[in-house]
Image (spheres, helix red, strand yellow):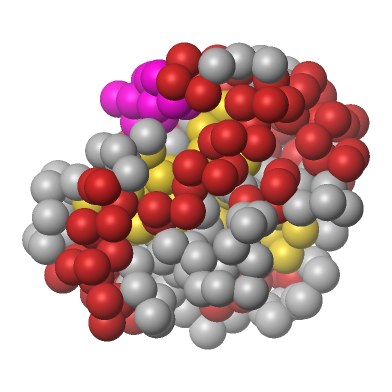
Amino acid sequence: MIDSHCHLDHEPLFSNINEVINRSKKIGLKKLLTISTSLKSFENIKKILEIDEMIYGTIGIHPHESSKDKINSNYLIDNAKKYKKIIGVGETGLDFYYENSKRNDQIDSFIKHIEASISLNYPLIVHSRSAETETFEILNNYKNKNIKILMHCFTGSKEFAKKLMNLNAYFSASGIITFKNSLDLQETFKLIDKNRILIETDSPFLAPIPMRGKKNEPSFIKYTLEKLSQLKSINFNELEKITSNNFDNLFS
């Protein structure tokens, strides 16, 4: 198994990083991808990468931070090239639900991340909330640029998923697919090609059932894979291999 999206620089994971890694290995996790969300976050991630060989990272500014942490494409490109274990660009995208940053700042930052990911030929980790139309329109502008899209913690509509499939996007399933009220999302993941699905925890957020109410961590990913296995009618061990291969294909 591979956790394609976690935040090891967030508490309580950061203060208990060795225990978190040990529990991850115990359940069979092979890789953890810890995601940058701000300039400060990236500084911490660079240190975390040195803790264990199973940990990889990304460089990026979350849409919530895009008014505060303004960067250009060269910053992303130059820093990604400096560190061998930085393998993706993001978390970027649009969040018009909270609007913690101005919409224009989010869009500008998103475009800079897209340009960097294309230049590097690295996957782009995309966050999209209450912004399906705008997210797709921007990504669609780059459809002829061989952009590698990973829709993180995908919770979008079937229509959005179908549009993104035409851009050869990958979709990451989080603990949200285990929630009782996520019937529409469960139906959407039934439609998505098994060879385009990754799994993630987004820890320390979004703990899956039966761990709701606890701080999430990478070792809880098995519950998400179990639910996905049921939805896709694919054996757990086979789907573990498929999702891991999908990660390796995307991030190769």
Name above or below for residue 49 compared with residue 226.
below
Q: Quadrant of residue 78?
A: bottom left
Q: Is residue 169 left or right of residue 250?
A: right
Q: Position of residue 148 (x, y in %)?
A: 50, 30
Q: Residue at x 12, y 55 (%)?
A: 52
Q: Nearer the viewer, residue 116 or 170?
A: 170
For the question of whether residue 198 can be seen, the reply is yes
Question: Quarter of the image containing the C terminus?
Answer: top left
Question: Quarter of the image containing the N terminus?
Answer: top left
Residue 225 is covered by the magenta coloring: no
Which residue range is magenta in the image?
A: 240-252
Q: Position of residue 92 (x, y in %)?
A: 55, 57
Q: Nearer the viewer, residue 230 or 184?
A: 230
For the question of whether residue 112 can be seen, the reply is no
Name above or below for residue 217 compared with residue 244.
below
Q: Position of residue 105 (x, y in %)?
A: 64, 71
Name above or below for residue 106 compared with residue 127.
below
Q: Quadrant of residue 164?
A: top right
Q: Residue at x 84, y 30 (%)?
A: 187
Q: Position of residue 22 (x, y in %)?
A: 21, 57
Q: Is residue 107 left or right of residue 41?
A: right
Q: Nearer the viewer, residue 225 or 201?
A: 225
Q: Residue at x 51, y 23 (%)?
A: 236
Residue 243 is covered by the magenta coloring: yes
